Image (cartoon, rainbow, N blue to C red):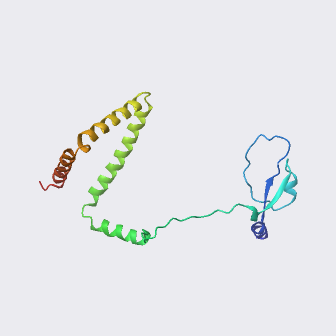
Amino acid sequence: MAATTAYAAATTVLIPRPTSQPTRCSALPLLPPRLSSSSTTSSSFPLKQVSESRKPLLLQIKATSSEETSTSVDANELFTDLKEKWDAVENKSTVLLYGGGAIVAVWLSSILVGAINSVPLLPKVMELVGLGYTGWFVYRYLLFKSSRKELATDIESLKKKIAGTE
């Protein structure tokens, strides 16, 4: 118990003093101070004691806006909301099945992307195909006002098909 309080009361940090001899290690880790003074004399390089007051201060900066836009969420409130929503689900096995399927799909797609990425020239070709498709999509649907309206109607009809209201 006495050793613990003596260690906690120590206020100095030992750092190596630069010497004229070159060292092999350019960066040494900062170690906590030792309890006994005899352990510092067995070192192969001279040590210098520096007080903790010379350590640089760490500043914490928090950015806030003039309006009150805080979005802090209480963990208990979040868990109670999730529990209420889970209790409201009628077919829990279907939800678990879809969730497990989504996790497996993400896992398989990461394996597929890793395999494609390991082929030497294929990733650059895929990037080129993606850039070409993006350029075509912008030219076809986003560049002109009439084509933007067409895209909006296509999206609305797709939403109706998915929702089953059409």
In the image, what residue occupies the spot 85% across and 48% down? 45
In the image, what residue occupies the spot 79% across and 68% down? 6
Left or right: residue 70 compared with residue 131: right
Q: Where is residue 118 in the image (x, y as percent from the top left)?
A: 44, 32
Left or right: residue 135 compared with residue 150: right
In the image, what residue occupies the spot 35% across and 46% down? 104
Q: In which quarter of the view is residue 71 placed? A: bottom left
Name the residue at the top extreme: 121
Left or right: residue 132 compared with residue 60: left
Q: Where is residue 89 in the image (x, y as percent from the top left)?
A: 27, 64
Q: Where is residue 15 in the image (x, y as percent from the top left)?
A: 79, 54
* 106 or 136, nearer to the observer: 136
Q: Where is 74 relative to 32, above or below?
A: below
The N terminus - image quarter = bottom right
Q: Where is residue 44 in the image (x, y as percent from the top left)?
A: 85, 47
Q: Where is 9 relative to 19, above or below?
A: below
Q: Where is 139 relative to 7, above or below?
A: above
Q: In which quarter of the view is residue 41 placed? A: bottom right
